[in-house]
Image (tube, rainbow, N blue to C red):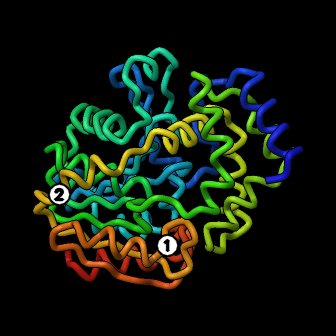
Amino acid sequence: MRQEEFTLLRRIFVDTSPDRMPETPPNDWPDVSSSETHVVNGICWHIQRLGKPRGEAPALLLVHGTGGSTHSWAGVTTPLAAHFHILNVDLPGHGFTHVPPEVERARNPFTLPGMARELRTLLSHLDEQPDVVVGHSAGVPVLLRMTLDGAIAPRHILGCCPALVPPPDWYVALLAPLLGLVVESDALAGSAARLAAATSIIGRMLQSTGSRLTAEQLARYQQLCSRPAHVHAAMTMMSRWDLPALFRDIGVLRVPVQLIAARNDRWIPLTSLRRAVERIPGVELVVEEGGHLLPEERPEVVIRLLQDRRL
């Protein structure tokens, strides 16, 4: 990162306060006709329910990764809607799920246990009990934590490009200065719109995933990253992630786990991931072509693996 970019980032993130008012997805957002808003324990959740009515098909829960949203699953929802009752959620602070500052201060919902706890509360409120859960990147540890805690009891866990290893050195070098600002400041300040306009960091981040996205897919990330609340949630989540605690408990897991690694994933190195998943009982690791944003780049992989299991 160039010095002038870092100086700009510090000014953007520290000198101004983010707008954290709730927003609704725009009319052209994927599956927007299925969007719902639920206020649960102070958090205003954005979710999407589509597919078969509840009780008429297996219930499928979709959980995106850091910096993603319901849009991360746009390529899988329509094909799977014929076979599942689908619940697609924006994690706390991400996309169009709003976390008021007082809730963040009181409950710390951007940690791994915090994400798992808040999502458990949402599912209880909705009376949803997923039979199958699918996560991407950091969404995979969230689902594993929920399963270990007894918050969910799925028949199968499918994880895409699971964030179960420390990030590579180049990734840390790119983001460490920004994560440091998050730790030093109670609120990630600034306008992500100014960030996107003044630097190439968003495009560089997406390019660094190893995935090839369409112009439409890139535009969705640009839109999300123009919202300071979304950027705040993503970067605070990264700064507070704790995998060692998860792996201390993972040995008691008894749910079948299938993980998809992407051969060109520059964020989750395959060699490191192979070593990490050896600690998960009965895990199956599948390697596919693609980058870190595999559910968007190659949604057919997720669809095929779910259909192959005849769930």
Q: Residues within 10 Å of mark 1 (few under 14, many from 20)?
A: many
Secondary element under disc 2, as helix, strand or loop, is: loop
- Label number found at residue 239: none
Question: Looking at this view, is 19 or 142 the one in front?
Answer: 142
Single out the mark in the foreground, 2 or 1: 1
Q: Residue at x 33, y 21 (%)?
A: 41
* Residue carrying label 1: 269
Identify the amino acid type marked 1.
Pro
Task: Locate residue 233: give its quadrant.
Answer: top right
Residue 58 in view: yes
How far across and how far down the image is residue 203, in percent? 75, 59
Front residue of 255 and 73 = 255
Name the residue at the top extreme.
102
| Viewer-side residue, 209 vs 167 | 167
Secondary structure, mark 1, is loop
Question: Which amino acid is tagged 2?
Answer: Pro
Residue 136 in sight in this render: no
Where residue 163 appears, as percent x and y from the top left, is: 42, 60
Identify the image quadrant of the C terminus. Answer: bottom left
Residue at 56%, 49% in the rendered image: 67
Q: Is residue 188 left or right of residue 43?
A: right
Quadrant of the image occupied by residue 84: bottom left
Residue at the location (73% across, 53% down)? Answer: 202
Task: Give the answer, above or below, for where 149 lies relative to 209.
Answer: above
Q: Is residue 103 rendered to the left or right of residue 192?
A: left
Residue 288's image quarter? bottom left
Residue 229 image point, x, y percent: 61, 32
Picture coordinates of residue 258, whole percent (x, y): 27, 73
Q: Identify the residue at horizontal 68%, vertical 59% (top origin).
A: 205
CA separation, marks 2 and 1? 27 Å
Q: Which mark is residue 154?
A: 2
